[in-house]
Image (spheres, rainbow, N blue to C red):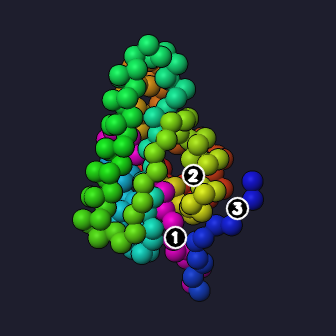
């Protein structure tokens, strides 16, 4: 995968980010990571992309619970809109949202980053979705993104 990243290298060797992706779920660590992403977006006058996925890897077990899946889709959509309003109220000038149904880490790397040319991913260290905790108890996908993303990844604890 060849990506043209959009960060700017300053004369002093520092980096200024232009497109920051924040991955959110309902975890406390995602909320902490969101605060860091907002601060960075303000500092660098960067675009902030708020991303949340309904993890379809876990949905197969709920095929018969159609109303629950619809409710979960609505929760994901509501979540990113709430985060968007918070970011705007805190002074981030450019904010957009992206939601989907997929394995979050792989979708972020394979679909979202190429489309939005993100140069920094911010995520919580152990964020999990309610469904994953209920079904299989898995942790966050931050290590996957740290290993495979074509851009910098900031993991917040």
Percent x, y of residue 36: 37, 59
In the image, what residue occupies the spot 40% across and 69% down?
94
Asked if the residue under mark 2 is in contact with the one under mark 3, i.e. CB atoms within 8 Å, the reply is no
Residue identifier under label 1: 17
Percent x, y of residue 81: 32, 51
Badge nearest the viewer, 3 or 2: 2
In the image, what residue occupies the spot 57% across and 82% down?
10
Percent x, y of residue 128: 42, 33
Is disc 2 surrounded by few (<14), some (14 to 19) or many (20+) residues within 10 Å?
A: some
Is disc 1 surrounded by few (<14), some (14 to 19) or many (20+) residues within 10 Å?
A: many
Alpha carbon separation for disc pair 1 and 2: 17 Å
- Magenta-highlighted residues: 12-29
Whether residue 120 sits left or right of residue 90 in the image: it is right
Of callouts 3 and 1, the N-terminal one: 3
Can residue 106 be seen here? The reply is yes
Q: Quadrant of residue 42?
A: bottom left
Residue identifier under label 2: 112
Residue identifier under label 3: 3
Can residue 125 be seen here? The reply is no
Nearer to the camera, 74 or 80: 74
Query: Helix, strand, or loop for circle 2?
Result: helix
Alpha carbon separation for disc pair 3 and 1: 15 Å
């Amino acid at each position: 995968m060849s990506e043209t990243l959009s960060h700017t290298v300053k004369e002093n060797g520092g980096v200024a980010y232009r497109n920051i992706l924040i991955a959110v779920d309902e975890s406390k660590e995602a909320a902490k990571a969101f605060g860091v992403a907002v601060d960075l977006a303000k500092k660098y006058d960067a675009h902030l992309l708020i991303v949340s996925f309904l993890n379809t890897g876990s949905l197969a077990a709920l095929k018969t619970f159609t109303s629950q899946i619809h409710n979960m889709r609505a929760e994901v959509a509501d979540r990113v809109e709430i985060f968007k309003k918070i970011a705007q109220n805190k002074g981030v000038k450019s904010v957009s949202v992206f939601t989907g149904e997929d394995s979050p880490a792989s979708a972020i790397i394979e679909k979202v980053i190429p489309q939005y040319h993100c140069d920094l991913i911010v995520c919580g260290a152990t964020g999990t979705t309610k469904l994953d905790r209920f079904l299989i108890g898995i942790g966050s996908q931050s290590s996957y993104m740290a290993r495979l993303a074509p851009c910098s990844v900031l993991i917040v604890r």
